[in-house]
Image (cartoon, rainbow, N blue to C red):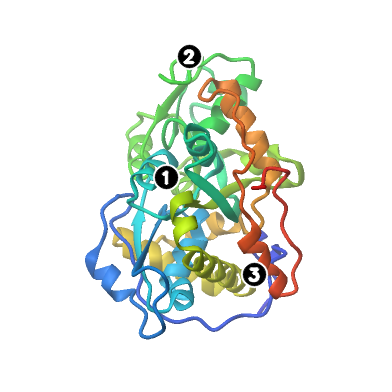
Amino acid sequence: MPAPRSTVRRSVAAVAALPLLALAAAACSYGSEAKDDDAKKANVSAGGKKLSTDTVKIGYFPNLTHATALVGIQEGTIQKELGGTRVESTTFNAGPSEIEALNAGSIDIGFIGPSPSINGFSKSQGKGLRIISGSASGGVKLVVNPDRIKTLDDLKGKKIATPQLGNTQDVAFLNWISEKGWKVDAQSGKGDVSVVRSDNKVTPDAYKSGDLDGAWVPEPTASKLVSEGAKVLLDEKDLWPDKKFVITNIIVSQKFLDEHPDVVEAVLKGSVATNKWINANPDEAKASANKALENLSGKPLPKEILDPAWESIEITDDPLAETLKTQAGYSVKSGLLKEPNLQGIYDLGPLNKILEAEGRPEVADAGLGVK
């Protein structure tokens, strides 16, 4: 294999490849919250002892920033660790709706961004969820219509999409606007820039029709827009020290963690194994993630979208907890959240146990772990 070039390939998690079980993905229609019964049935392990529950319900997004879930479910790596306990999966457009599902018990474990994790933890007064691992860094871009916007200053007065009110990209964009000295009402999105909350699956069509001037969005939506003639005006990683920031965590409901710690540990083992394989086999992993997206949407991403999107994402077990603290400050400054008490938002004990068993260093919780 040629020398690694992508950020994904440079992740510190890269090690020797692991064998994967080729099992069908448990999935549903692109961006939807409905479950696919046929896919769920296909994801039952061929053998193995059932753990403390019959099923574990996992939520994630049909985004490449959720590659751990896409690949881990597509290749059966997570299911392998669960044995006879079955994975059921559900996809979401953005984090706030996934938090609602977690609170309602519709999912047990979720791949999700930091801002909804912070909001969900804060609203439940620290009783609703825990972050148990990282998953990805990067993969978010501001892309614009180059005929209407030439420089960052040209965003004033324009219509820019984010995936959902209060999701991670929405909060990041509101913070960026504030740092420019511009004013926007966080709830309505009205102000010096019009922040349009738009489902990722419809944003490209809205852009093509001229209803949007650009978008602050995760991959592959950003590269889809570029394929429609948009230009990357800003890569969010360039705003962060060391060009790293958490874009995807793994969360679990506190109730499920208390009742089924064996299942949580099995999912984490599957996640760690998946990340290891992704970083050691980036080309094969990229193809697997694309196959998972095809199963969700009915068609794969073309090469001109897939390749640049994949290059901009780093897959990592590290939750990059310090960057979550920074993003919490963004939510407060935007007015979407009161100053939160985040003590206990992380429970990295199970993950660090797995990493230690592999002879790898522990990951840090920035002083926000359970006591």
**Does residue 76 lie above or below 339 as drawn?**
below
State the residue at coordinates (52%, 42%): 117
Residue at the disc numbered 3: 354
Residue 337 in view in this figure = yes
Q: Secondary structure at mark 2?
A: loop
Q: Nearer the viewer, residue 138 or 336?
A: 336
Q: Are marks 3 and 2 in contact (CB under 8 Å)?
A: no
Q: Which of the 4 image quarters holds residue 210?
A: top left
Residue 151 in view in this figure = no
Which mark identifies residue 349?
A: none
Nearest to the eye among marks 2 and 1: give it: 2
Q: Earlier in the sequence, mark 2 or mark 1?
A: 2
**Does residue 5 lie above or below 234 as drawn?**
below
Q: Are marks 2 and 1 in contact (CB under 8 Å)?
A: no
Locate residue 169, reporting x and y percent: 52, 37
Give how far apart the Cα atoms at labels 3 and 2 are: 48 Å
Residue at the disc numbered 1: 228
Residue at the disc numbered 2: 191
For badge 2, the amino acid type reads Gly
Residue 31 appears left or right of 189: left
Q: Earlier in the sequence, mark 3 or mark 2?
A: 2
**Does residue 94 lie above or below 317 as drawn?**
above
Q: Nearer the viewer, residue 333 or 291?
A: 333
Near mark 1 (Cα within 10 A), the count class, few <14, some 14-19 or many ≥20, is few
Q: Which of the 4 image quarters holds residue 330?
A: top right
For badge 3, the amino acid type reads Ile
Near mark 2 (Cα within 10 A), the count class, few <14, some 14-19 or many ≥20, is some
State the residue at coordinates (32%, 54%): 30
Q: Nearer the viewer, residue 84 or 38?
A: 84
